[in-house]
Amino acid sequence: MTELKHTSPAMDWLEAELADTLDEDYELEISEPALSLEIARIYKKAHPETIDRVVYFRELLRLQSELIKLQSWVAHTGSKVVVLFEGRDSAGKGGVIKRITQRLNPRICRVVALPAPTERERSQWYFQRYVPHLPAGGEIVLFDRSWYNRAGVERVMGFATADQVEQFFNDVPEFERMLARSGIKLIKYWFSITDEEQQMRFLMRIHDPMKQWKLSPMDLQSRVRWEQYTKAKEEMFNRTNIAEAPWYIVEGNDKKRARLNCIDHLLQQLPYEDVPHEEITLPERVFNPEYERRTLAKELYVPSKY
């Protein structure tokens, strides 16, 4: 095979594609666009050195290529996968979900992040609003928070009564066993961060206009009720860590390591393998010598500001 020279059009195109891919990753990694220097200084002092950037991107791309293989296997075998992401506010759930879905087909891998229940939903069986979002064959569903809201925020903030919480703990193990018996692979992650780390991340959001939308009154109250959340989490683990769907704790103080560790662990939970693919060939374009492309009105085009 003739080796491509660096100056060939094919190599130039490949380098441009790789550069675009890296730019997308850099864009995702911009986390402090308007952060004050003082907060940045304090955060750097309080936070340990993270993984080398080059190592991080190399490993992330390798793991994402494995996720593509997993996606193909799920679609090929008709498997059904549900992954729950739970943890304190700002623990890093959203960051890892973004990296998992970044290169996957949204028709196969989708994210569910439900808003607060409506009046009608509050009168239903508690699990009812989650059931319609469960996967069919060949699908992966990632829940950004899940039915475990009842064991956490609803309990701590007083949105659920003691009887409702007790009923949840009695029901959830059997509910999850039902999912397992139906052929759903259920994987549950808890992202764990320290009190000090959450405080720093909240301060970063307060001082960053591009992240202030992430802070809700509920988030701020979670700081006040830190110990109550801790007790609720511990009981949740004790009563819902079942063989069919155990909990896995991801240490989240270092965001980059947490992402890599979680994705690597997720891949290990499923027996995926390479599946057969038809060779893809680009068909020839049908050319009609009598066809003339119409000239469209200028006002139809988006202005080229950049």
Image (cartoon, rainbow, N blue to C red):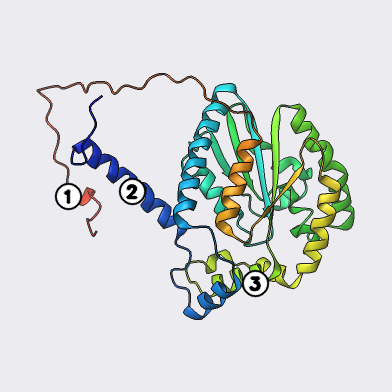
* Quadrant in which residue 213 is drawn: bottom right
User: Please, which residue is most extreme toward the bottom here?
Assistant: 38
The earlier-in-sequence mark between 1 and 2 is 2
Taking the spot 71% from the left edge, 44% from the top edge, the residue there is 188
Q: The residue tagged with tag 3: helix, strand or loop?
A: helix
In this picture, is 135 found above or below 102?
A: above
Residue at point 21%, 23% (across, down): 285
Q: How many marks?
A: 3
Give the labeled residue for mark 2.
Answer: 20
Please determine whether, in this image, residue 253 is positioned above or below residue 145.
below
Whole-percent x and y of residue 252? 64, 58
Estimate the x, y position of residue 167 in percent, counting from the top left.
Answer: 87, 47
Q: Position of residue 35 (x, y in %)?
A: 48, 74
Type of residue at label 2?
Asp
What number is the disc on residue 298? 1
Identify which residue, 19 or 214, lies in the foreground.
19
User: Which numbered circle lies on residue 227?
Assistant: none
Q: Badge 2, how many Cα within 10 Å: few under 14, some, many 20+?
A: few
Residue type, numbered disc 3: Gln
36 or 137, nearer to the observer: 36
Report, in whole angstroms, how far the alpha carbon at label 1 lies from the one at label 2.
Answer: 29 Å
70 vs 229: above or below? above
User: Where does the image place residue 195, in percent across and percent down from the top left?
Assistant: 70, 69
Marks 1 and 3, Cα distance to the nearest angstrom? 51 Å
